[in-house]
Amino acid sequence: MPEQEITPLHINPCGGPNAESDAGSSFEPSRDAEIYLDLGKTTDGDDDDDNDDESDTSTVQYEQESFDTFKFRVLQFAQRIWNVSSAEHITIERLRGGGYNRVIGITVDTPGAAGSAQYILRIARSYRPRVDRDAAAFIFAKRCGDLVPGCMPVPHVLAFEEAPCNELDAPYMIQSRLPGENLRTTFLDLEHHQKVQVATQLGRIVRLMLSVKKPQAGQIAFSADSRAMNICNHRIDSSIPSDRSSFFLPQPIIEPFLTSPVLQHNRSCSTGEFIIGKFKSRKKALEEENVDESTKYFDEDYLDQLITMTTEMDSEGWFRNVPFSLCHWDFEPRNILLSSDRDASSDVNITGILDWDHASIAPAFMSCRPPMWIWAWDDEDDEDERLANDEPATQEDRELKQCFEEAAGPEYVRYAYPPPYRLARRLVRFAIEGFSPNDNNMRFSHFYQEAEAMMAEWAGMRTVSPVERQEGPCDEVQQNGTGEECSTESIGTTSDEGAVFVDPDQD
């Protein structure tokens, strides 16, 4: 659907909207609000909390305002943003949010326009959000997807605001709303030939992410030149009118996770150096008592053990020649949209990959966690990756796995199934994300238990030689799980070896 133009906000970063806007930074339901409620439309979307009990739970869990009153704020916000005088032309749709963002659908139906326009409003829950980093990650991912048209659809970021200087009393991001239905609720209802299409398309998306290679691991952020325009609100799309002489022209860059002498003189960092460097930086922070939230639940003993494990894996060659690639971090059915206009005989298409907030450049094996739900669906969100090497139960399931692997390519297969890479994926998460408390005694928290189990499993693996394991750590695995040669079907411009190299920073 067409994107409605957004009238620029007039924002005073220190004190809420200025005199040119009637909206204050806090909004109390009033007689006017009651009129808005009568005219504006609110609906429960397909991705919405399933019932009022879930909605109440969300309100309590995140200590947020109930949607019953918050929708007044959203309606007033939408009227100002899209310059719509009558609330009857705005529909507000409550959608299922996540741990970091409240999500609301907004449809704007302007009289005389070619059609209604649909948007997603993401409202930060955190008291210390980094909406600018989220926006940078989405923009970077979209640029990658646009280089291979139709392969990896990503929402378009239209605007974001970093300070709570608005009717919502929170930072927010506005995105285009992509069509489709959530794959988590539709996959099991597909015919087999449609599941094959989904598996193939998802494999190509993984292959595209693996093709985005950088010399260092890091988080995606805006460049210093972009950040120099650090005003309260940002209009990104050039089709959106602005009261400023120029638009915010975002330049996403990779901000290294690791800043140390290793990276001086722009030298690239190996995967082993990166992981060890992250743990050492956390250890140094503990020694200096300069501890952030994700580090203070470590202790030096655990850090030393994790450093030892990393050193051992590196010395055995598991991190040798492992590049850094684009990683989504939550590539699950709940974040995938599928075309909704289908019947049993029609083709299906992936119409959206969502939730790029924490996307980063990370060791390539981080993007190679087997999506077992494709060939071994489990209603539980957390799959047991230890079962990834099991033979699929049926011929149809084996075909789904083979189609995915052929589309994802040999680099995926290399990193997906060897058990050390399964442990390495958890190791890198500990290095980047740290530990977080989940009860009063951290020694009994599942984070420590998981770390201990990971290190114990690695110790057991080390007693078996790579030859006995029949998996050389540096071999280029060229076969898929069925023992057949992988296809190198192109998703873009490929080299002779079939690897695709995509650089969104190049025109």
Image: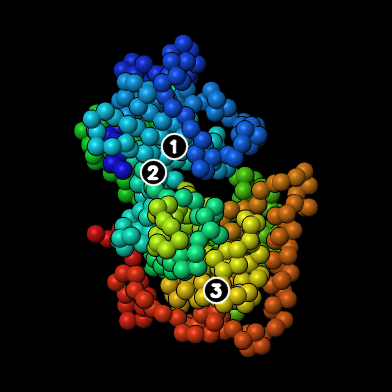
Query: Alpha carbon of mark 2 to alpha carbon of mark 1: how far?
Result: 8 Å
Instruction: Decide if residue 495 is on the left or right side of residue 131.
Output: left
Q: Is residue 5 above or below residue 504?
A: above
Which mark, by number, is residue 396? Answer: 3
Residue 363 rendering spot, x and y as whole percentages: 50, 66
Cβ–Cβ below 8 Å for labels 2 and 1? yes
Q: Which residue in the protein does label 1 denote?
A: 105
Q: Which residue in the protein does label 2 denote?
A: 177
Residue sticking out furthest to the bottom:
467
- State the residue at coordinates (45%, 19%): 38
Q: Nearer the viewer, residue 192 or 103?
A: 192
Query: Alpha carbon of mark 3 to alpha carbon of mark 2: how far?
Result: 33 Å
Residue 235 rendering spot, x and y as whole percentages: 31, 37
Model colouring = rainbow
- Three-letter amino acid code at disc 1? Gly
Q: Quadrant of the N terminus?
A: top left
Of label 1 and label 3, which has the lower sequence position?
1
